[in-house]
Amino acid sequence: MIEMLKNWYTRRFSDPQAMGLAAILLFCFIAIYFFSDLIAPLLIAIVLSYLLEFPIQFLSNKFALPRILSIILVLGSFITFALLLAFGLLPNLINQTLNLLSDLPNMFNKLHEWAMQLPETHPEFVDAQMVEGIFTATRSKILAFGESAVKFSLSSIVNLVTIGIYAFLVPLMMFFMLKDKNTLIQSFTQFLPQNRHLANKVWQEMQLQIANYIRGKLFEIAIVTLVTYIVFLFFGLNYPLLLSVAVGVSVLVPYVGAVLVSVPVALVAFFQFGDHSTFWYIIIAYVVSQLLDGNLLVPFLFSEAVNLHPLTIIVSVLIFGGLWGFWGVFFAIPLATLVKAVINAWPSTEELNVIVK
């Protein structure tokens, strides 16, 4: 067994380039996994700076603006948009969330009344005791959820302080990262292994794909949210902003997110309109919007992304989401693409045998 492991290690890690890439990946994994809470503002600043680099270069190259002026214009526009979003969207979103929570008891009672009619209409399929047992268990879960929501609201007061600190630190770090980009990159590369040609190859392959993915995913969220909001407003559905934002955010979790967010959309539509034609129109419009997103919008926005199998995407979401929560879900596809790029770039057994000889 030991000899087999030794031979495998010799075949896979004889190349110093492979060792350098493995060391970089291991260091990044340890730093993010164990210190993600401490360096969260830094990671957010890096991601946002990476996104803003494209419009900054566009202004500098297209209109011959000094880089510092391009940074001020782009970063100022980004901060202004974020403030408008925070003070214009969040109050309405919070208000609709509170209204939905206050309506949950009535919705639950209506669902209970409807379910208790099923044993009378379909006694061969539904048992009254079974339905009552399900609703009793569900009621206890809702009460437990209410208690946890109260605790969360109390702890959110402390989180507001953290958000305030982030709101100051992140734009400040973004400014210096964009302003002193080359200097910071040169300083960082001094701590990397000398044998990093393979790592540079993987990074060059991933750089364009990561940027396209992040920009494309943000555009997808915005478009899906806007289209869904217009559809819900057209049919007069309650809580249109809350539900449309939930539908937009659900695109972060491919396949699974669309299924999960369909439940609250269908429930709210059912309790508002009942078994009426409007309910079915909303469901049909929602399904059509999801089909257009998956078959038209996603191929257009991610035409340059690496093609991954759906099972690979789902497994990536589960693994990276379990490791890093929301950000793991958001970057599940780029991380899966990174793993694929590393596997493809890793020296083959024949290449390593040549190096060893």
Image (spheres, rainbow, N blue to C red):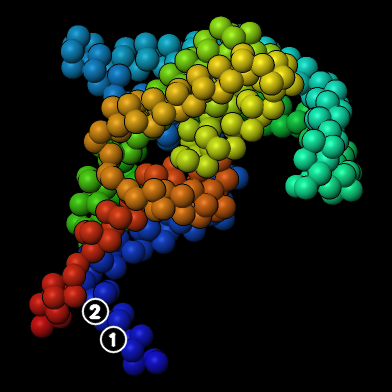
Q: Is residue 31 left or right of residue 212?
A: right
**How many numbered marks, from 0 up?**
2
Residues marked 2 and 1 touching at CB (< 8 Å): yes
Task: Describe the element under mark 2 as helix, strand or loop.
Answer: helix
Q: Is residue 308 left or right of residue 174?
A: left
Q: Is residue 117 left or right of residue 204?
A: right
Residue at image position (33%, 38%) is: 210
Residue at image position (81%, 44%) is: 123
Disc 2 from disc 1: Cα separation: 6 Å
Task: Report which quarter residue 218 is drawn in.
Answer: top left
Q: What residue is disc 2 on?
A: 11
Task: Describe the element under mark 1 as helix, strand or loop.
Answer: helix
Q: Quadrant of the C terminus?
A: bottom left
Q: Can you see residue 47?
A: yes
Amino acid, disc 1: Asn
Q: What residue is disc 1 on?
A: 7
Q: Residues within 10 Å of mark 1 (few under 14, many from 20)?
A: few
- Relative image position of residue 258 (x, y in whole percent): 52, 35
Residue at image position (39%, 92%) is: 1
Amino acid, disc 2: Arg
Residue at image position (20%, 52%) is: 201
Q: Residues within 10 Å of mark 2 (few under 14, many from 20)?
A: some
Comparing 312 with 268, the one in front is 268
